[in-house]
Amino acid sequence: MKKLSLSILILCLSMLIAACGEEPIRATVGNPAPDFTLVDITGKDWTLSELKGQVVFINFWATWCPPCREEMPSMQRLYTKLPKDKFKMLAILNRDAPSMADVFVQKAGATMPILDDQSNTVGSKYGLTGLPETYIIDKQGVLREKFIGPAQWDSPQFIQMLMTYINE
């Protein structure tokens, strides 16, 4: 009987230790943005922490998402308006085939980097609730803004917000 009780105790302790494991890092406004490395559809590696010193616009999207497709032209216009040496735009393809994105961006004329997150590894780190979702990260790597849903990214209000972070 003592042997069985000891086995049960060990099992319970193991389960308790596993249940008390650390929570996964989630993107929270005001905290450092979770770092990641992804490959874009041209084969280039992108690591968020290597972009410190620049304002980074991260947009999670998919070709099967109508609001994502609708906001892409305004993202492209924003991308061409802001200084390339101080601003990076990363469009992260979430749970979608890169071949589909390749066709879409060619038709849309999009030139920003399109990163592949088919497995939702980075999306999980950021705690995605849907698509599109956009995150603005300041020059120090701190998440400053989170937007859920589509936006007109080249509107004066968004350009002004981004220029404020760029000029800090």
Image (cartoon, helix red, strand yellow):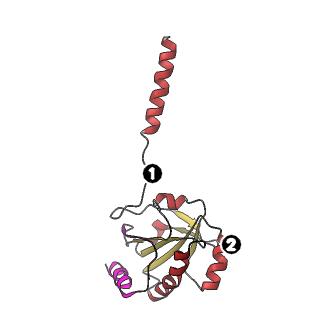
> Residue at left 51%, top 74%?
90
Residue range in magenta is 139-168
Helix, strand or loop at mark 1: loop
Residue 24 disc label: 1
Can see residue 18?
yes
Name the kind of residue labelled 1 in the image.
Answer: Pro
Residue in front for this viewpoint, 18 or 70: 70
**Whether residue 38 is situated above or below residue 76 in the rendered picture:** above
* Of 35 and 2, the residue lying toward us: 2
**Residue 136 % position (x, y):** 40, 72
The label number, if any, that marks residue 99 in the structure image: 2
Q: Residues within 10 Å of mark 2 (few under 14, many from 20)?
A: few
- Magenta-span inclusion, residue 142: yes
Measured in 3D between alpha carbons, the distance from the residue under mark 1 to the one under mark 2, in whole angstroms, is: 30 Å
Which amino acid, by three-letter code, is at mark 2? Answer: Ser
Side of 55 relative to 113 (left or right): left
- The spot of residue 130 in percent (x, y) is 49, 65
